[in-house]
Amino acid sequence: MRYIPNTPADRRAMLDAVGCRSLDDLFSDIPEEIQRRFRPLGLPERSESEVVAAVEQLADRNRAQRCVCLLGGGVYDHYVPSIVGHLTSRSEFYTSYTPYQPEISQGTLTAMFEFQTMICELTGMEIANGSMYDGATAAAEAVLMADRVRRTGRVAVGRNILPHIRRVVGTYAWAAGIDLVDLPYGSDGRIDFTDLPNDVSAVLLQTPNAFGVIEDLTGAKDRLADALLIVSVNPLSLGILAPPGRFGADIVVGEGQPLGLAMGYGGPLLGLFATRRQYLRQMPGRVAGRAVDADGNVAYTMAAQTREQHIRRERATSNICTNSALCALAATIYLASVGSEGLRSIAEQNVERAHDLAGRLERLAGYALRFDAPFFNEFVVSVPSDPAALRGRLSAAGFLIGDPQELADLGVERAVRFAVTERRTTEELDRLVGELEAAA
Amino acid sequence: MSYPSDLRYTRDHEWVKIEGKRARIGITDHAQQELGDIVFVELPAVDASVSGGDNVATVESVKAVGDVLAPLSGKVVAVNEALESSPEAINQSPHEAGWIFVLELSDPADVDELLDAATYERFLAEG
Amino acid sequence: MRTIFEHANEGASGGFVPSLSRAGAGSRSPISEHLLRTDPPRIPDLTEPTISRHYTHLSKLNHGVDDGLYPLGSCTMKYNPKVNEDLARLRGFARTHPLADPQDAQGTLELLYELAELLRGIAGMAAVSLQPVAGAHGEITGMFLMKRYFEVRNEEKRTRILLPDSAHGTNPASAAVAGFTVTEIPSNDAGTVDLAALRRTLDETVAGIMLTVPNTLGIFEEQIEEITGSVRDAGGLCYFDGANLNAFLGRARPGDMGADVFHFNLHKTLSTPHGGGGPGAGPIAVSERLAEFLPVPAIEKTEAGYRLSWNQPRSIGAVHSFYGNVLVAVKAYVYLLQLGDAGLRAVSENAVLNANYLQERLKRVYSLPHDRLCKHEFVLSGKGLGEGITTLDIAKRLIDYGIHPPTIYFPLIVREALMIEPTETEGKESLDRFIAAMDAIASEARDRPEILREAPHSAPVRRVDQARAAREPVLTYPFDSPS
């Protein structure tokens, strides 16, 4: 029991102090009948090295790590600077908990304050929280918040948002009794703002959307009457794309994984949530604020806690407690490492490489860009043959793309989607194009 | 502390000052002490109708939220807007400058249900 | 504390990836002007040495479990094994995209499947979902399951969730978000659920009860089967908040106590780190009658390997983007593999022994509302220590002794509450140091109360004025008026 410091002598001394004969006596308050029903797992103790060997073998069986990743859909294969992992591995950061005692949590709180600031800078919004679980639950909470503010019981959702976001929003909306109304997309893959439903609490869009297409939010807010505009974003794209705040968004949510997190088969992720200052009391999640200590020095502390569950209980703005704090720290360090200029440069490289591939694919017989609209690092192409078979063929050659059924479910048949990040090398892209040429 | 004898009180720690057919309402010194430094007050809307027992306003400190219940039924005719910028007035002067709202009473006789200062002080002592 | 924004700009950094060697070749037209940023985000461009120093310095302002005792009741701040960290970082786990074909992620899928089986066994229940990523997330998922269960049975009149008045704040919040109303059940003088009061409120509008076992006073509900039996007889379901599983790991199972839903906190009981507030993981186990409503996709084992199954027609849908916090699940799996049955049993034995030892010693000087056998945690009151001395003062003074304060002002049913949970990863020597510190503070409260009221004295900052911060919250760096 390498993690248990008590010696048998310690236990004996403590049992004596407590007046118990044996450890079993300490469990006399659990009904005997319940203890009798207990069954062990049949699991032996194992040494550290045995466990390492077994789990390394499991990791090895993930073939995906040895392939070229062209998968996207909110989670991307970006380069994570080494420094991020080193700093987040400092045990003062990762073994501490929620900063309820600010005097000994200034590391966590200062970093949270930096994160909130950076998210506001990226999104063009006034306030941001310290993270949510992921982009999908962030979107769900935004929908719930908007309906708390406007109370129509209806929210319009773009038909072209990522399926997993739609699924989670759907579950939370069902529980809250909110009806979701589909907003169709046009032939350019974008939402048509001329025909919005009225009497909705909010409109939820995504940009870049599930097709990788950048939505044009110009004038959208004006068309919404009273409804709140909720925009779900890829934060990396905001290194070069205009932030939703500039277009009058009321709430901006997003998936922060591209900012220095591993793909990790989908978790942990990083939910982003930013909004207007006037909605502070409605905003879910933890937030750090600047304060002073008894000597008048700047200190950071949890702010506006009365919105949260530990105080408001059933009247809280959300039930969230544990969030994605360490991932937010990783994102903060990532953004600090690349800086504003570096972020712009990385975003540009994503655009460049994706457009390079798109251009080359368009020159292949039977391939065409499905949507005539601007895109960031992801795009959909119509393909000449069965897309599922193409996926299989590419996989055999070591290139991973997504299940075309997901696109079909969004109304886009006979197509596949490619994501091209700054990690995709010339050699990989050359080989990919070669493979597609051979497949024809 | 000795509570002003010209005010009436509730077991939910509100005080009531009768002004003809109107009642000026706030929270007692005991309540503000329990809450600690008050940082935000959510005021009711003027012209809102309330029934006795309704949650009319909330008073927030750093660590707690206190509901202010309507001690009587009536219509809100005034709210203390100064609390928006200076919520600490409730801590500093809970029975005077820290008043929260004024009700036009539906039935002035309801006042008889309220506690007088001596009864409220006894109630606190028992707590 | 300086923020990163207060460092002077050092010019463009970069050099993380090479630039495209074939710029322009085959490219399509760029993105139109009006869709592009005009103002860059105000994030400084700094060199690596500056960044390393800044965040290293910040880390040293924190107190983590590796720094000293962290007896935060209800949070189980046990030691975070380092092998967990190493294995979660393995390339094979990190470099796998969630939308990869399951055939290309068999290692992760096997691990998740096996972990779910182990959790099922610990719970003694029928099925598990790893999708929820926090305890509160598990709670809300459980509430969704209950809602769907009653929807399918046309019993939507069941809108009330019962909660003891000692419940953790996430419990009523989760019930409310899921559209239920909350009925509070009083605790009796023994600190447990008043069974008579519970039975009086049971009718056909009750959807279920949410219980923490043992409760937030660290007391095991000896009438647990009567409680769950009564609720089930009335047609309701029983949700168990598993935050306190450390109290009976390896000894008892919630499935044997009448639970219909049980959530684990992997970042509490199963040693994964708290991360400064997250990420955690809150997998749920359910009884047979709720299994069909679990979130999609499910992870299934077949002869051809592991796969994701979306074929759950009555599922509530999804509560997470993908399959839950996979890399956190890896850490819990590694922990379980090392400990085995014997290790799990030793956890609760030592956790409960440590808590009772502390309780026995501390009750000499501090007020103990419930003087009886506790489980892995117990609650003291800071009342009566000195004129005007509050639990907050005691907590802040503990910081000067190098100890993280316990949970304060929770549960709400104890005034000036101090909730202490040592966990099994503290040894007697550490506990004795804590006792000595608490004894010293009690004396100080009597003899030099001002040293408590002005504490902490030796932390990176003095006591923070939270009231001022709360009145006009400053939530982002004030670029325009930096002072």
Image (cartoon, coloured by chain):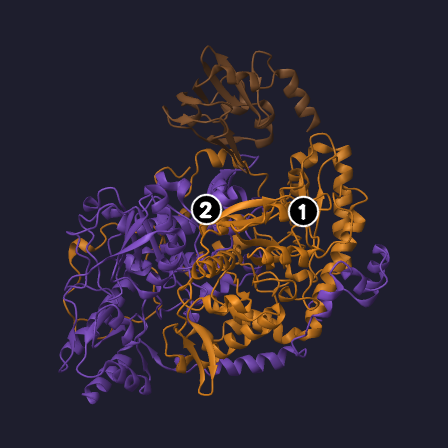
Chain bearing mark 1: C
Q: Colour of chain A?
A: purple
Disc 2 marks a residue whose amino acid type is Val
* Quarter where residue B14 is shown: top right
Disc 1 marks a residue whose amino acid type is Ala
Depth order, front residue of A343/B100: B100
Mark 1: secondary structure: helix
Q: Residue at x 34, y 67 (%)?
A: C15
Quarter holding the C terminus of chain C is top left
Q: Residues within 10 Å of mark 1 (few under 14, many from 20)?
A: few
Residue farthest bottom in this picture: A438
Q: Colour of chain B?
A: brown
Q: Residue at x 18, y 78 (%)?
A: A361
A157 left or right, relative to A12: left
Residue B70, how many percent across, how many down?
49, 26
In this orientation, does residue C58 appear? yes
Depth order, front residue of A74/A351: A74
Instruction: Identify the residue position indicated by label 2 in the image.
Output: A287
Residue A424, how many percent across, how many down?
30, 75
A148 left or right, relative to C422: left
Chain bearing mark 2: A
Q: Colour of chain C?
A: orange
Instruction: Identify the residue position indicated by label 1 in the image.
Output: C196
How much space separates mark 2 and mark 1, taking CA atoms? 41 Å
Badge nearest the viewer, 2 or 1: 1
Mark 2: secondary structure: loop
Image height of C16 relative to A47, above or below: above
Residue B1, how many percent across, how many down?
65, 19
Depth order, front residue of A172/A401: A172
